[in-house]
Image (cartoon, grey):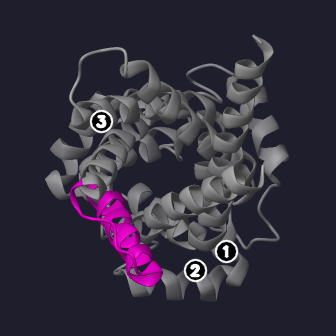
Amino acid sequence: MSAKPEVGLVREASRQIVAGGSAGLVEICLMHPLDVVKTRFQIQRCATDPNSYKSLVDSFQMIFQMEGLFGFYKGILPPILAETPKRAVKFFTFEQYKKLLGYVSLSPALTFAIAGLGSGLTEAVVVNPFEVVKVGLQANRNTFAEQPSTMGYARQIIKKEGWGLQGLNKGLTATLGRHGVFNMVYFGFYYNVKNMIPVNKDPTLEFLRKFGIGLLSGTIASVINIPFDVAKSRIQGPQPVPGEIKYRTCFKTMATVYQEEGILALYKGLLPKIMRLGPGGAVMLLVYEYTYSWLQESW
């Protein structure tokens, strides 16, 4: 008798993990070029830099001309390797935190937001080493064929700087802030708004209802969390003077960027980020929900 509920829990967890991993894989394959562009904007420091991009269109043209089509897919292997477990962790831990919070007398709105925050912090710990490698590869402006391999670059970081907060885990506090804030807003907004808007019986209109709410969720979360994202890119990317570490901690980096470059510098890369995580956020939630429903019916 006691074995049955245990099997049920394992099966339920497996469904959440498979659906979350599938959501992450689909999203990264579709949206990675915009992530490359976003990172390039965030690590450039001033308009007088001869390598700086003048606009979103200019960045796409320059990357294509100088680095070729594969330049848009630089650093894609770390997120592919990380994205499946990362999104699996994201959705699985969200469901688990939500279940745990059910034992506390919180409003549904607060439950969704706190569960989102918890899932983001957990996700950040898992993904940060992959992010360090990804940002370093994306910052490299050589052609795709000339850049180091993913494993080669990771080994290079470990050899020079180790595994710790100055090496493969640098920028951890900024990553915690980025993912914690994003997931808190993303899940909190999506599930609260979805529960307020009635379900549509027409499958197409129901799909559009969910997609629209997911799009808004990803967009709003991106606008709120981007200062953490900029800080993370500065800490994990190449420093202004080789051999000198200028950007060390999350909030100090934000303060330095604000003092030297103004408030708008904390929102660098916002347009490509929204273009990626607005529709990308909707894609993730829909792939997760439809895959999870399919798994419930067939498994």
Mark 2 residue type: Ile
Horizontal relation, residue 50 to residue 47: left or right: right
Separation of residues labelled 3 and 2 (CA atoms): 38 Å
- Whichever of labels 3 and 2 marks the residue nearer the N terminus, that label is 2
Rendered image: mark on residue 113: 3
Mark 1 residue type: Gly
Taking the spot 62% from the left edge, 48% from the top edge, the residue there is 20
Taking the spot 83% from the left edge, 54% from the top edge, the residue there is 149
- Position of residue 155 relative to residue 277, above or below, is above
Count every numbered label the image shows and give the total: 3
Locate the N terminus by quadrant: top right
Category of crowding for the residue at label 1, using alpha-carbon neighbours closer than 10 angstroms: few (below 14), some (14–19), many (at least 20): many
- Whichever of labels 1 and 2 marks the residue nearer the N terminus, that label is 2
Horizontal relation, residue 110 to residue 131: left or right: left
Q: Marks 1 and 2: CB-CB under 8 Å?
A: yes
Residue 249 sits in which quadrant? top left
Q: Give the magenta part as a residue range.
A: 196-220
Which secondary structure, mark 2? helix
The residue wearing badge 1 is: 71
- Position of residue 238 relative to residue 27, above or below, is above
Residue 240 seen by the camera: no
Mark 3 residue type: Ala
Residue 297 sits in which quadrant? bottom right
The residue wearing badge 2 is: 63
Residue 38 percent location from the top left of the image: 44, 64
- Whichever of labels 3 and 1 marks the residue nearer the N terminus, that label is 1
Taking the spot 66% from the left edge, 51% from the top edge, the residue there is 19
Horizontal relation, residue 38 to residue 107: left or right: right
Residue 254 percent location from the top left of the image: 26, 38
Which secondary structure, mark 3? helix
Residue 107 seen by the camera: yes
